[in-house]
Image: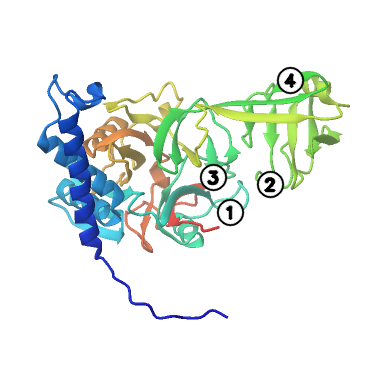
Amino acid sequence: MDTLIEKKEFIIPIRTCEYVLTISLFTIFALTNSIFQPPLLANELLLANNAITTPQLIDITTNLQQELSPELRREKFNNRIRNKYAELQVNDVTDGVKHIKMVKYYNKKPVRINIVEVNHRVANNYEIKPVIASTTLANKRKVRTIAQNTDSIVAINGGFFKPESGIPLGTLMINKKLYTGPIYDRVALGIFEDGYDVGRVQLNAKIKGNGHQIKIDNINQPRMLSSYILAYTPDWGNYAPASPQYGVQLQVVGNKITAVSTNPLFIPKNGYVIVGPKSQLNKLIGAKKVEVEISTNPKWENVKHIISGGPYLVKDNQIFIDMTAQKLQSIGGRNPRTAIGYTKDNDLILVTVDGREGSSIGLTLKELASLMKSLGCTNAINLDGGGSTVMYVNGQIVNRPQQTGGIALSNALVISKRSRI
């Protein structure tokens, strides 16, 4: 049985600790600067051959203090947002998450814009991640439903998808599990524990057996060429899609081929099905063991989530729109838009733009790129748009999609409470 013993404790207020820490750090830096002339790390601590100055020491100390103090990190983020949107109403969603509405004019015509800014270090009880509409890929739900099913405080529509089935088109990874592979090397956002990255993603996958090594062209994606070899996991559904002409299917469980057929095979819960030309897959038949190896380029070894979109909007601080290279010519013109990017301060920015109506005419991709850059994004990408564009904040759809609540979607990007294991 636990025993409770009352103890008198001497409690130092948090602010006092912060002041002591600041003075201690300042003293250490000051002593270091006075003892070493020039400093040992001359390239880092010298500016034009002059020793580091007192104002610089204060800046270094302040930055270190802000890194160590959650309260000061929150205050710094709040001040940054307040100054950035000084003329606008900033709504608190939760600590580290802000919602802003604005109207901008293009050719003297209005455009309604909704913005959510997130600092993941302040909002450390929440995580930003993609989610699918249901338990398998071939499903669609409205953003509000997806948000409510995941207890999310913010949600926007995600990447492109096949309208008929709901299958996501492009790279989708959730909690380090790859659901779908890339198409056309389109750009994607990688979400890490400590930040973000963007890149045009390629799949490096192969299946080995019987002394052969065969390339896998994609995972859980619709077939584009009859020569492609595709892998289908239980996330696809119960059965693999039809084989191509002169094709075959291999069912694999525990590194062993358990069934071969030209007809659609059942996808086992603890395995997968490989579908492709007989001329290639017949080489594996009879193998005692088959193994699959999968990686992506860029490697992004510690990436937790990936969501695909395209094209780029901002790349390394410059407006960069590679619409043709990513085979996205069909999404040109002035339309409702959804975009995502991040700043040098590691704030994530989610944006939706209403369009196709007199009260909000939408944006071109170039205008969207300029907007994201003006908001401070060092890198930003376009997501699905048009009728898909929806933003949900604290139980409400805050933009005005053409169809009430927006259309049913394949996937969304949400902000929800962090899972505790």
The residue lying furthest to the front in this view is 35
Nearer-N-terminus badge (1/4): 1
In x, y percent, where is residue 317? 27, 28
User: In the rendered image, which residue does mark 1 sit on?
Assistant: 134
Q: Residues within 10 Å of mark 2 (few under 14, many from 20)?
A: some
Nearer-N-terminus badge (2/4): 4
User: In the rendered image, which residue does mark 4 sit on?
Assistant: 213
Amino acid type, residue under disc 2 in the picture? Gly
Residue 28 figure quarter: top left
Which secondary structure, mark 3? Answer: strand
In x, y percent, where is residue 104? 18, 44
Say if residue 406 shows up in the picture: no
Residue drawn at 69 percent across, 21 percent down: 227
User: In the rendered image, which residue does mark 3 sit on?
Assistant: 174
Verify CB contact (< 8 Å) between mark 3 and mark 2.
no
- Front-most of 353 and 296? 296
Residue drawn at 23 percent across, 43 percent down: 63
Amino acid type, residue under disc 1 in the picture? Ser
Nearer-N-terminus badge (1/2): 1
